[in-house]
Image: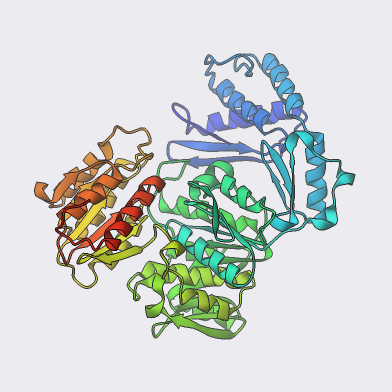
Amino acid sequence: MLETLGEGADDPREWDGWRERVQRLGTALGWPVDTVVVRPHPGGAALAFGAPSDGLYAATELNEWAWLSQRRAFVLHAPGHPAAWDEDSARHTLAAMVAGEANPRLRQLEAQATARGVPVLADDDALTLGLGEGGQTWPIAALPDVADVHWSALHAIPTAMVTGSNGKTTTVRLVAAMLRAHGLRTGHSCTDGVFVAGEQIASGDFSGPGGARAVLRDPRVQAAVLETARGGLLRRGLVLPRVDAAAVTNVSDDHFGEYGIHDLDALADAKLTVARALDADGVLVLNADDARLAARGEKMPCRFAWFARDHDHPRLLAHRAQGGATCGVRDGRLHLCSGGQGEDIGDIGTMPLTDGGLAEYNIGNAAAASLVAQALGVPAKTIAGVLSTFGSDPGDNPGRLQRWSFGGLRLLLDYAHNPEGLRGLLRVARAGGPKRLGLVLGQAGNRGDDDIRALAGVAADARPDLVVLKDIDGFIRGRATGEVAQVIGDELRRRGLRDDQLRICLPELGAVRELLAWSQPGDVLVLPIHALDAKAEVQSLLDGLQASAWQAGDQLP
């Protein structure tokens, strides 16, 4: 896939010329190009075509050549790339690339696995047939003969994908806990790392295909839950062609302007890509309170499970009448239904994850996770047991609505990386009427100024008494140091905050210390922290202050 940029990027005549060149040269290379896709969007288009799995690099070169040749963009490039100004020369160069990349044994193994219903994972380094404890992995450079594979030992494992604008990591962690409680050795990947049987085996943002492959290739894993972020979907596609369940938690403003996604409708379509991995038996879990997801979901040819804040939401009522699975709240209790049978799975006010029912977004996450777990075979009693305790231990859901109470303060640590996430967190913070509200605030540099100002607007609506503006360590992403903080500060002033209510301390840990030094008993401090190292440092600081009986107003160690 290629993203067009610049002059002519949005010209359908140029796309037609590109298409004709791809098909002509693809045929000459022995690749009849049957699937060609043009996805227009504001400012350009995504131009894509299908190619053999052992020719993806050569296909990328062909794609670039076809566009540059059509545009007569005869740019200088490194030797060895196809010449945009000379088709005969380009054909010879591409033919050499195809021959060098060809791996007939890989394609034979993939074809045999597909015929046998065995999942396939392939990348630059390795081929895996089967998943988890039912899988085996070989280096790409040392693949076995088809006859030497022990096919009867290879199989799939229960697998789910979770995507959405907010709540992905919490939902993944909940489903993984439910599967473990059901007795399955579970692997999961998320923005914080890769985990097997509750043990972290890699740290970092693993919400893309790399994290998914790490989980699915671990021979200990008996069930898998994969956070599937928008960026990975748009850059790399689906890591698996088939899963047992997929969930889309919600869709809200975030990441606009990247990879042809400029509005909520396009974002909803991108998130719903996970539904393509479901066969007739797979279950798509959707948020009935999200109008975009609801409207699109009903048109998709798969089984559904719906969740909503209200157990008696019209869509849930209609779905249950047909024997479908739903999860929602009635009279303060979460109800899980399927096949005409209903189960009361707990009082939302006593679930640690909901903070006494104040964290409405986590009620939705709990409902989504319950439906995913049910689709993977976890009984309602086990689901209820996990919901009754999950979140009471800080290690259950680190960095997501983590709470401390010490020194006369209430402190909330969360990811809250977009307007909707921050709005939900501040709603929890404002409950009970704090004496004063303090907030640290920053944003990744790859967000547009309008998106950054929208985040600042949500903060301003909460009427904070102090905002400490920060950068996000490792997420400057092309901006100057402090540039994002400046945009946020300008918008907060425009919305009525005074200069004495704003401070700048760019390191995330320093921003938290600034807020603690300002605090007084009765305050609530809201800490959206994003970089993994900074989050660990802040957690260590707060744990230490709590253990030492530090009081607001005391000097910070």
| Residue 72 or residue 483, whichever sits in front | 483
How far across and down, in percent of the image, does residue 381 sit? 56, 81
Say above or below: 513 vs 167: above
Q: Is residue 59 left or right of residue 529?
A: right
* Residue that appears at 29% across and 67% down: 428
Position of the N terminus, as image quadrant, is top right
Query: From this viewpoint, is residue 412 visible?
Result: yes
Q: Residue furthest right?
A: 147
| Coloring applied to the structure | rainbow
The quadrant where residue 244 appears: bottom right
Q: Position of residue 59 (x, y in %)?
A: 66, 31
Q: Is residue 323 above or below residue 72?
A: below
Instruction: From the viewer's perspective, tell me whether residue 306 is left or right of residue 351.
Output: right
Q: Is residue 255 visible?
A: no
Q: Give how far across and how far down residue 357 sits, in percent.
A: 35, 75
**Where is residue 32, by image quadrant?**
top right
